[in-house]
Amino acid sequence: MNTLRKLLSVACIGLLLVGFVSNAQAHDARVAKITGTAEVQLPGETAFKSLAADMAVPQGATIRTAAGAQVFLEVFPGGIATIDSDSTVLVEKLALEKEGEVTTSQEALLDLKKGSVVSSLDPTKKAINHYGVRTPKGVAAARGTVYTITVGNDSYTVTTTLSGEVTITGGGSTVTIGAGGTSVNGASQMSGSDLAKPENAAANAVAMKAAAIAAAALATVAGNTTNTFGQGAADTAQGELNTVLTNIQQQLPQATAQAVASGAAAAPALAGSIATTAINAGGSATMVAAAASQGAASTATTSDQAASYANAVAKAASVGATADQAAAIAQSSANGAAQGAVNNGVTVDAGAIATAAGSGASKGSGTTVTTPTAPTTITPTPGQTAPGTPITPVDPNVLVSPSSPPSG
């Protein structure tokens, strides 16, 4: 009897081991989208080769992006790592386990050598997500959040959390960074007001860029309706984008303009909703309208397209506004759209853009808005032509003294 029990025990253990081994599956990351030029060095190879959309990226590969490039890497379902320009990333670990058709664990660890990575993790999959980014200052790990890490050439590391929480472990200590917080070199959380102090100017600049990159990355996914990033990714990204924009305005307000502009440039069709979210979070309606219009119009190829963006943003931003407020929003939208289009090399019909902005503001506010003055201060802004690039928006006060923004 004892012998039989032993044999059964051994058999059961063997079956468990077989089951465990069968759960672990080979898993590659996938290039969901790429803009610009990037290269990959595969494991065991010394040379780099061109990276392309839909390419499988195995564990041990190194990705290198050129200036102006971005790689959207799906590390596992619901996990998108956006590798920004001039960055080098080693895909250190990829793991996926399943029980039948159900994923029970998905893991990814990226080693950021230099540059910036935006990590967006589906918050509904916290229970199975195991994700981290290694830096010279430690590993920043999360399960369901959006955060950006930047590593400079001198290993100066800045982690900015845009939603959820990130845990940074390194040097024998662990630090948790909440939404809207920033950590410099793995140190304790700094708030937006801390970053705004003169002595923290370098970290503030990195955090502001991080917010802009994150907004653009999320907007790119949210604006895609063809399941390029996986089933349901667009809806998840839209929700995360709203959360991120709200946290930026409330916790890092100095980054709102660039985040709005970059998000609108990455997904012009979402410019109106981006503006609405930022305004409802407390952003200045005129500033937000200028930024959203400029961002969207930076992708325009005709003056008519720029006018349509001015119309959409003015309409969305004017909801709940008084007539005077709507007029100021219309002017800001016209200014921004004209500037964005000019930056993209478009010859604009300033009068038509102004008319479109006035019409949008009238519809949004339900009041009669006089057509804004046709923008006249629109000369190209150097270095601000690429869609998705953080944009310094035109000053909405240049041609108008705006009224107080609507309360949202």
Image: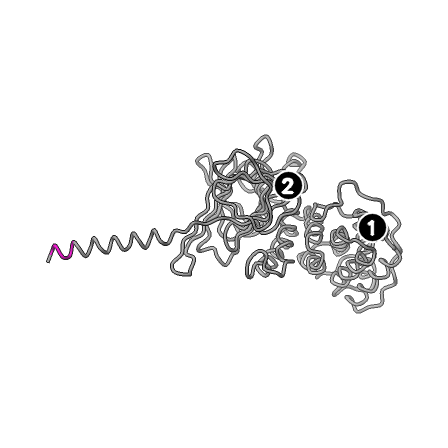
Amino acid type, mark 1: Val
Taking the image as shown, residue 363 lies to the left or right of residue 73, namely: right
| 365 is within the stretch colored magenta | no
Quadrant of res 357? bottom right
Which sits in the foreground, 190 or 161?
Answer: 161
Q: Which residues are magenta?
A: 2-6
Q: Is 140 positioned to the left or the right of 99 in the image?
A: right
Look at label 2 and name its amino acid: Ser
Is any atom of residue 95 visible in this view?
A: yes
Residue position for label 2: 85
Q: Residue at x 64, y 54 (%)?
A: 220
Circle 1 Cα neighbour tier, 10 Å, few/some/many (<14 / 14–19 / ≥20): some
Query: Closer to the N terminus: mark 1 or mark 2?
Result: 2
| Residue found 76% across the figure and 58% down from its top | 405
- Name above or below for residue 134 compared with residue 237: above
Above or below for 290 versus 153: below
Residue at the spot 42% in from the left edge and 61% down from the top edge? 101
Chief secondary structure of the magenta portion: helix
